[in-house]
Amino acid sequence: MEGVQSVDPGKPVEVISNELDALDHALEHAIPQEFIFFNPEHVMETLQYVKEIEKPYALQ
């Protein structure tokens, strides 16, 4: 957060500790064609989750 705050102190920042909740939040608030970088600690669990939810977010 320090980097964001140093560039734009008024920019709202939300911290979501649970990786899957954070991914859900990013996907639900994404703008079409937006790039989301997600670097999970629990890779295999996250991959399984992405496979389960990918259809609604697939590119048309």
Image (cartoon, rainbow, N blue to C red):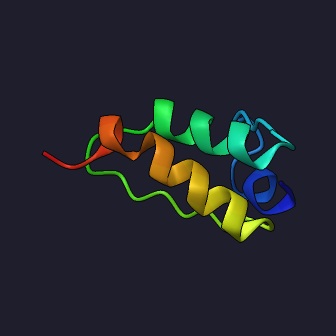
Q: Is residue 48 above or below residue 23?
A: below
Which quadrant is the N terminus positioned in?
Answer: bottom right
Residue closest to the eye, 2 or 28: 28
Residue at 78%, 63% (x, y): give it: 3
Q: Is residue 57 above or below residue 48?
A: above
Left or right side of 56 for 22: right
Name the quadrant containing residue 45.
bottom right
Residue at 60%, 34% (x, y): give it: 25
Residue at 79%, 58% (x, y): give it: 6
Which quadrant is the C terminus positioned in?
Answer: top left
Where residue 51 appears, as percent x and y from the top left, is 47, 53
Residue closest to the eye, 7 or 31: 31
Q: Is residue 29 visible?
A: no
Name the quadrant containing residue 23.
top right
Residue at 58%, 62% (x, y): give it: 47
Left or right side of 7 for 34: left
Where residue 4 appears, as percent x and y from the top left, is 73, 55
Name the quadrant containing residue 43.
bottom right
Left or right side of 59 for 45: right
Residue closest to the eye, 24 or 54: 54
Where residue 36 appears, as percent x and y from the top left, is 48, 57
